[in-house]
Image (cartoon, grey):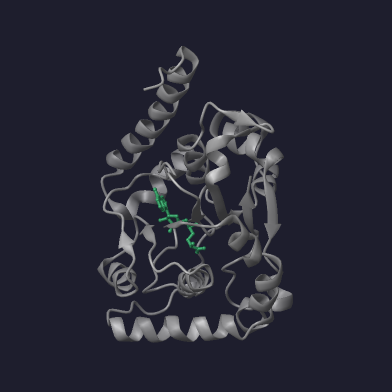
């Protein structure tokens, strides 16, 4: 076994402490419904979930699946998806995604936005030829979990607060997640080895989420260095491919729902 240098061990310890700190916050909230409170201690939401997004709580799996089917059809027939299929999805195919982890989709049984984001995840899986994904959102209820399981996805049984180490090329599907969650993914995958100014671990990551630069532009400089030091580094070396403008290419839904505004594919 190769012995790790002191610097390497120090870095690993720091990453571990960061993740433990997040664990402490989520434990102390002691309820999945309070997850936003705990995350707000560490970072502000990117986008607020708007109430108009909410549908009547759906308790019937058949009804939820029907809604997802309709959103999938809507997406497939949209110029938005056609454009994505030319400009963004081929980059993911070239990257060679082996695993998908979906964080923060929200309540699929209640939110139109979450249904559209979930429908898009299904399309992505088809495009990438993957029939398995892992998912977690602390607000998921039993009906949301039923949906994941219906599509053969594994619901992660522990709030890992984004601290998952990618062992192979992994797509982190994180539409509109909070800043701390992107920071966690970067911290967990920060390795000692660097080439072309980028940590080797980050090269295993593809993230569908909010554009890092745009997010950081909205924060105070003091906050960036304290809460998002890795996002700050990543924004300068990441290659971001913006999703098409919803209002122009996704007219069918963008009047009332914005599932993919400010969204980009981020790779290193
Ligand atoms: C701003 S909301 C976005 C929800 C949805 N994707 C949308 O666009 O409306 C952020 C989501 O991240 C989820 N979240 C918070 N902490 C999380 C964690 N530790 N792991 C996964 N998801 C988390 C929240 O519950 C919430 O659903």
Residue 228 appears in the rendering: no
| Residue drawn at point x = 51 percent, y = 74 percent | 123
Q: Image point 59% across, 77% down: which residue?
A: 256
Q: Position of residue 14 (x, y in %)?
A: 44, 24
Question: Going by the picture, which residue comes out furthest to the front?
Answer: 1
Q: Is residue 142 above or below residue 12?
A: below
Image coordinates of residue 64 in percent, x first then y, are 36, 81
Figure quadrant of residue 83: bottom right
- The answer to whether one can see residue 259 in this image is yes
The foreground one among 226 and 83 is 83
Viewer-side residue, 8 vs 68: 8
Residue 226 found in image quarter:
top right
Residue 219, x across and y down, in percent: 65, 40
Location of residue 153 with respect to 24 vertically, above or below: below
Rendered view: 102 above or below 87: above
Residue 24: image x %, image y %? 32, 34
In this view, the residue farthest toward the right is 248
Indicate the quadrant containing the C terminus: top left, top right, bottom left or bottom right.
Answer: top right
Horizontal side of residue 132 vs 262, given as left or right: left
Whether residue 57 sits left or right of residue 12 in the image: it is left
Which residue appears at 56% of the width and 84% of the height? 74
Indicate which quadrant contains ligand 1.
bottom left
């Amino acid at each position: 076994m190769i012995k790790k240098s002191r610097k390497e061990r120090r870095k690993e310890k720091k990453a571990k402490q960061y993740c433990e700190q997040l664990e402490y916050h989520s434990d102390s909230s002691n309820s999945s419904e309070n997850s936003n409170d705990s995350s707000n201690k560490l970072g502000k939401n990117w986008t607020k979930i708007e109430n108009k997004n909410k549908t009547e709580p759906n308790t019937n799996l058949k009804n939820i699946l029907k809604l997802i089917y309709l959103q999938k059809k809507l997406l497939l027939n949209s110029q938005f998806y056609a454009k994505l299929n030319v400009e963004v999805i081929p980059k993911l195919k070239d990257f060679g995604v082996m695993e998908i982890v979906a964080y923060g989709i929200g309540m699929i049984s209640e939110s139109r936005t979450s249904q559209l984001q979930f429908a898009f995840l299904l399309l992505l899986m088809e495009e990438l030829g993957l029939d398995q994904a892992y998912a977690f959102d602390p607000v998921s209820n039993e009906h949301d979990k039923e949906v994941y399981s219906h599509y053969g996805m594994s619901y992660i049984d522990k709030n890992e607060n984004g601290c998952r180490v990618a062992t192979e090329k992994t797509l982190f599907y994180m539409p509109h997640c909070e800043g701390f969650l992107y920071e966690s993914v970067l911290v967990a995958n920060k390795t000692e080895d660097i080439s072309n100014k980028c940590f080797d671990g980050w090269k295993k990551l593809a993230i569908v989420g909010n554009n890092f630069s745009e997010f950081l532009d909205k924060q105070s400089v003091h906050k960036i260095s304290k809460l998002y030091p890795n996002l700050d580094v990543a924004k300068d070396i990441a290659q971001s491919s913006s999703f098409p403008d919803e209002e122009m290419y996704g007219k069918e839904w963008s009047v009332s729902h914005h599932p993919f505004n400010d969204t980009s594919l981020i790779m290193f």
